[in-house]
Image: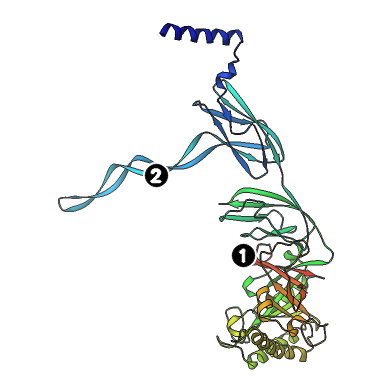
Amino acid sequence: MKLLGKLCISLLSVLMVVGFIPVNDVNAAVKLSATSKTIYVGSGYTLKLKGTSKKGHAKSSSSAVKVSAVKKTKKVKVRKRVTVKVKVRGKWKKKKVWRKVTVKKKVTVKNSFYLAGKRAGSADVSVTYGKNKIVCHVAVYQPQLNTVVGYTYNLASRLSHTSDSRYWTSNQAVALVDEYSGLLMPIHSGSCIIYRKVNNKVKSQIKINVKSSGDVKVGVDVSRHNGIVNFNTLKKNNINFAIIRGGNGCRKYGTTDKSSIDLNLKRNIEGAKAAGMEIGLYWYLNSSTNGLMSSGDAKLQGERFADRLSSLDIEKNTPIYIDLEEHSALLKSGSKNTKAEFQKEMCQIFEAKLREKGFTNIGIYASTSWYKDYLKNDYFMNKVDVGEEGITSHWLAHYNYASKEGAQTPQFYYNGRLITPDIWQTGSRFRISGTGSTYVDMNYLYQ
């Protein structure tokens, strides 16, 4: 039997030498996890060499693909000198001893290679093991999205969102992105790259091509909370308008003076005008206590705001918004109709004081849920022309809404009639140069 086995091995060797059996067939079980692969710029793929105990080496034929060995964190036990306290003759002393301790260590995963897409193009990634070589053809594409100013888009699904993802734009003057949700907000014609990062490392990206829309303007809303705002920088970044906080309630806060006027009101108005930006104003309607508002609260706030605007020589047709969002001050107990009627009364008292000074362009700021649940009456829902008593404009706060077919902005119904906002506040976690704070609220104005 042993002789027969030797004869078989010899015969096999002869057949291989003379060419009857291909040499590669000996390695037929060795293969790559893919022989062709499509990846995107900013993303990648882990290529594995299977079926061999030999150590493989990978190399890319083009700068379109960067190849690196895959490493993982592993807990291992190592001998290490550590300082311990030991008792010698009744006294504690420090002593260095050798101990086995568990540590985290980066180790290379054998025959696993990460292929990272660096630019659009292609590359042959060759993996050698011993004298053998296997090739994987890789095509790298740059994902793109074409969009228009006034439409938002959720990039999280396109860029493989994870809970620790953060999003960044390469050009703030073209498009902004909500740092946490990945909501894209185009602001001007041009192109930019939106990156998804994890631990400050780019994991995926997409090219954004933006077209401007003649009937949409882009703006910010700011207050003392935003620190010192550089409106010239905002203007250079294609921000068209600013809605500036006038004040908050009837009490002094850290961001208001004793008359409840925003500490940066005058500075922000002058800065925005000097930069050539259009302006609007808003007042946070609140009570003088932690409880429900009174008619006296509403009257006092209207008087203070109107007097300050008159002293600042504000144009009479400047849009002024009543900010309705303070639950404790504005939501009287009872039905939704009762709550709407109460807020109507407060707004009419506040509005009357502004009208006495000639300011007749009064709108409402509220969230979608507030409009739907607490403002359902004709006063809030039926818009009037500037100069008439009533509400001239709807400013809607609705975050992380991605524009849909036939629904560019968030909408809601009142008595069977579709309500579409004039101004839409798209989110509050955008970064743009020119604002002193980390984040800023962004808005679209539809003309």
Whether residue 51 is situated above or below residue 198 in the rendered picture: above
Between residues 25 and 200, which one lies in front from this camera angle? 25
Q: Identify the residue under disc 2.
A: 103
Question: Looking at the image, what colour scheme do you see?
Answer: rainbow
Question: Percent from the top left, x then y, of residue 45?
Answer: 61, 40
View extreme (left): residue? 89
Q: Please state which of residues 61 and 49 is positioned toward the viewer in this rendering.
A: 49
Q: Which residue is mark 1?
A: 438
Q: What x and y, as percent, mark residue 339?
A: 64, 85
Label 1: how many Cα within 10 Å (few below 14, some 14–19, many 20+): few
x then y, percent, for residue 212: 81, 60
Residue 105 lies in quadrant:
top left
In the figure, 32 relative to 443: above or below? above
Q: Amino acid at mark 2?
A: Val
Q: Examine the image and state in which quarter residue 214 appears.
A: bottom right
Tell me where residue 308 appears, x and y as whole percent: 71, 86
Q: Which of pointers 1 and 2 lies earlier in the amino acid sequence?
A: 2
Tag 2 secondary structure: strand
